[in-house]
Image (cartoon, grey):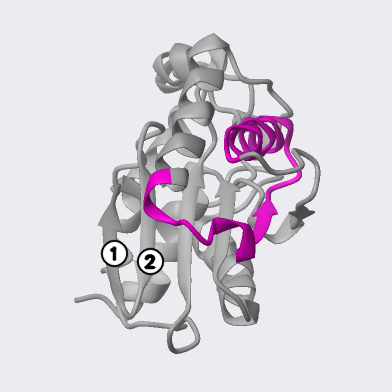
Amino acid sequence: MSADASVTVSLRPGLTLYLIRHGETDWNREARYQGQRDIPLNERGSEQARRHGAILKDIEPSVADFDFVSSPLQRAVETMRLARTVLGLDPDAFRRAPEIQELSYGHWEGELAAELPAKDPEGIAGKSADPYGWRPLGGESYRDLERRVSDWLASLSANTIAVSHGGVSRVARGALLGIDRAIVPFLEVPQDKILKLSGGKMQWI
């Protein structure tokens, strides 16, 4: 285990967090780095968002009592609005938290992953050498992201449904479950499943 492998934060006892990655965008489909670029959902992403609402409706009869929080980026906000509509809730009655917006990829934002080895071999080498600590020019490392997401996790005081991003989902699991940080950047982040975090355990729904 690495020096960064210990649990760094825990949810308050009895609290449940449903963490949803936003639905698909055209940039996701193209394997283009989004970071904090404000990209809308595509048709498939909208369908995924509605499905999340239907799943939550089935598993949480008291879902209206949860706190609803979204990243301020458009793809997350759209996902939350669509899910809340399916739940029969006011689509706009939720909070936006900048702490859970996506990792900033700096100079890589807008670039196709397949083209970066030729365009930025030095950056690719740096990321390969230290996937958790490498920071793109003008951007953030996974370590940077975990610091702000951990502060947000520690602040939660009620059962919460949050719509966020792949990087946020990864570092939240690393911080709450003590996953080796060398592995964190490679954790799966499906857009068609909901991650349940509670009592030091996780479950995909």
Q: Residue 197 got which mark?
A: 2
Point out the image quarter for the N terminus: bottom left
Residue range in magenta is 58-87
For the question of whether residue 131 can be seen, the reply is no
**Residue 151 % position (x, y):** 63, 76
Q: Are marks 2 and 1 in contact (CB under 8 Å)?
A: yes
Disc 2 and disc 1: Cα gap in Å?
A: 5 Å
Nearest the eye: 157 or 72: 157
User: Which residue is denoted by mark 1 in the rendering?
Assistant: 202
Residue 37 position (above or below residue 87): above
Q: In the image, what residue type sits under mark 2? A: Leu
For mark 1, give the secondary structure: strand
Q: Nearer the viewer, residue 63 or 50?
A: 63
What is the magenta segment's predominant secondary structure?
A: helix
Residue 102: x %, y % from top left: 61, 45
Q: Earlier in the sequence, mark 2 or mark 1?
A: 2
Q: Where is residue 179 in the image (x, y as percent from the top left)?
A: 27, 69
Q: Which residue is drawn at 69% across and 30% down?
A: 78
In the figure, residue 33 lies in which quadrant?
top right
Percent from the top left, x then y, of residue 80? 64, 39
